[in-house]
Amino acid sequence: MKGITYVRDEQNQLKAVQIDAELYGEALQDFLDGLEAEQLKGGPKKEFDAVAKRILAKRKRANV
């Protein structure tokens, strides 16, 4: 497949995949976002209102 290279060890076991970011940048970012979301699944949750207040306060301080 163009822009994708499979890296194998001496026993021909797949060790890594190199992906051309210029060709697959958007799809690659979507994939990485999905991995991050999967890792955060089941983790601690924060109340929406508390997060929104913190973001708005930070934004307000930045505009001062």
Image (cartoon, grey):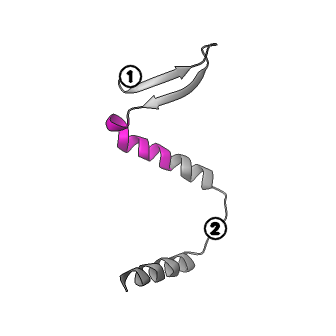
Q: Is residue 39 above or below residue 15?
A: below
Residue 47 at what x, y percent from top left? 59, 75
Q: Is residue 59 magenta?
A: no
Q: Which part of the image, by quadrant, shows the C terminus?
A: bottom left
Residue projecting furthest to the bottom = 64
CA–CA distance in space, label 2 to label 1: 40 Å
Q: Amino acid at mark 2?
A: Lys
Query: CB atoms at circles 2 and 1 under 8 Å apart?
Result: no
Residue 43 at what x, y percent from top left? 66, 60
Indicate the secondary structure of the residue bearing disc 1.
loop
Q: Amino acid at mark 1?
A: Met
The circle drawn on residue 45 is: 2
Residue 17 at what x, y percent from top left? 50, 28
Q: How many marks?
A: 2
Indicate the secondary structure of the residue bearing disc 2.
loop
| Mark 1 Cα-neighbour bin, 10 Å: few <14, some 14–19, many ≥20 | few
| Mark 2 Cα-neighbour bin, 10 Å: few <14, some 14–19, many ≥20 | few
